[in-house]
Image (cartoon, rainbow, N blue to C red):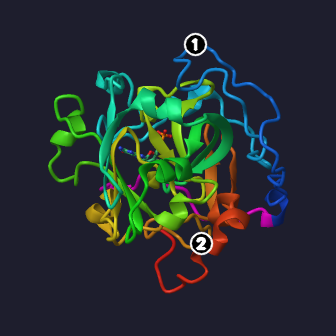
Amino acid sequence: MLVRTKPRWWIAESAATPESVFLDRRRIVQAFGLGLAGMGIGGDAAAAEGVARNAAYTLGDRALTDERYASSYNNFYEFSTSKTVTPMSDALKPRPWRIRIDGLVEKPFEIDIDDLIAKMALEERLYRFRCVEAWAMAVPWTGFPLRRLVDFAKPAAGAKYVVMRTFLDKSVAPGQKQFWYPWPYTEGVTLEEARNDLAFMVTGIYGKTLPNQHGAPLRLALPWKYGFKSVKSINRITFSAERPRTFWEALQDSEYGFWANVNPKVPHPRWSQAEERVLGTGDRVPTLLFNGYAPEVADLYKDLQKERLWA
Ligand code: MTE
């Protein structure tokens, strides 16, 4: 992300293990609900506990990241530019929380997070996650498909993009006093991307309500894109005819684009994307095209070859 010196997480480009070794993914099971319950340790029942795992989403070669690592190595610039976001993020009050849905929809409205959750059937999915900084994890997210929220919002004709924004409150998030960042954090996807099976709205992780540092109470997960697309603590969702100018694009568009699909062959201007460091393991493994989700998403981009599809 934006740094002035060589970042701590910089890695050298080095020989990669053949991709085929890692391509043996078994996400072909389409039947939903093997019946494995979420772990249900603590947390708010409405947001994560006891939720069934959707067996269609498995991790291939990757093991689940230990919760200790995923929950203590975060990017949440509203609270800190370091990876240690807690306890600063404790200042966020994720309930009560209202989400505004507006723009090109049949009728704009606001909804409370728990009312929204009550309308969406929750499921657990195991997803890989690849940050543009070349670290990666694999986590059990609880949530619901973004497509269901899109249908609920009833987009009007002419809507082409779904734009999502994080809350804006300097008294809670000291990072938002840093005026050179284009707050509020804004991200967006095309309506077609939003309707892809993989696009997921997250309300929990590891069988618990989403903790603040992961973007409580509602964040996005787009596993085929670099992690910065997965906007946290969303309180506004706008349907638009225009492509939004996103947070990182507005800050540094020579380095971060709108599409930001994972591609090991397209280096970031300041580092290679060929490999990734797996949180909590010390392993470096080859990065896969679309983070290993090419079968599910490559078609979305077949007519967009003139676009800068990779971050
Ligand atoms: N959303 C907001 N609002 N603010 C942020 O700083 N960082 C992004 C993304 N969403 C960010 C955000 C980046 S760069 C990454 S890699 C992921 O959140 C990190 O998610 P995690 O901390 O849950 O692993």
The amino acid at mark 2 is: Leu
From the viewer's perspective, tell me whether residue 126 is left or right of residue 170. Answer: right
Q: Residue at x 73, y 34 (%)?
A: 53
The amino acid at mark 1 is: Gly
Looking at the rendering, the quadrant in which ligand 1 lies is top left
The image's mark for residue 64 is: none
Q: Residue furthest top?
A: 42
Could you tell me residue 270's position as x and y percent?
43, 66
Visible in this render: residue 271?
no
Q: Residue at x 43, y 55 (%)?
A: 154
From the viewer's perspective, tell me whether residue 247 is left or right of residue 288. Answer: left
The image's mark for residue 42 is: 1
Could you tell me residue 176's position as x and y percent?
20, 41
What residue span does the magenta drawing correspond to?
1-19
Quarter of the image for residue 195 reads bottom right
Could you tell me residue 9's position as x and y percent?
49, 49
User: What's the CA distance linking mark 2 and mark 1?
Assistant: 38 Å
User: For mark 2, what is the residue?
Assistant: 300
86 in the magenta segment: no
As helix, strand or loop, the secondary structure at mark 2 comes to: helix
Could you tell me residue 191's position as x and y percent?
48, 64
Crowd around label 1: few <14 · some 14–19 · many ≥20 (10 Å): few
Quadrant of the frame with the N terminus: bottom left
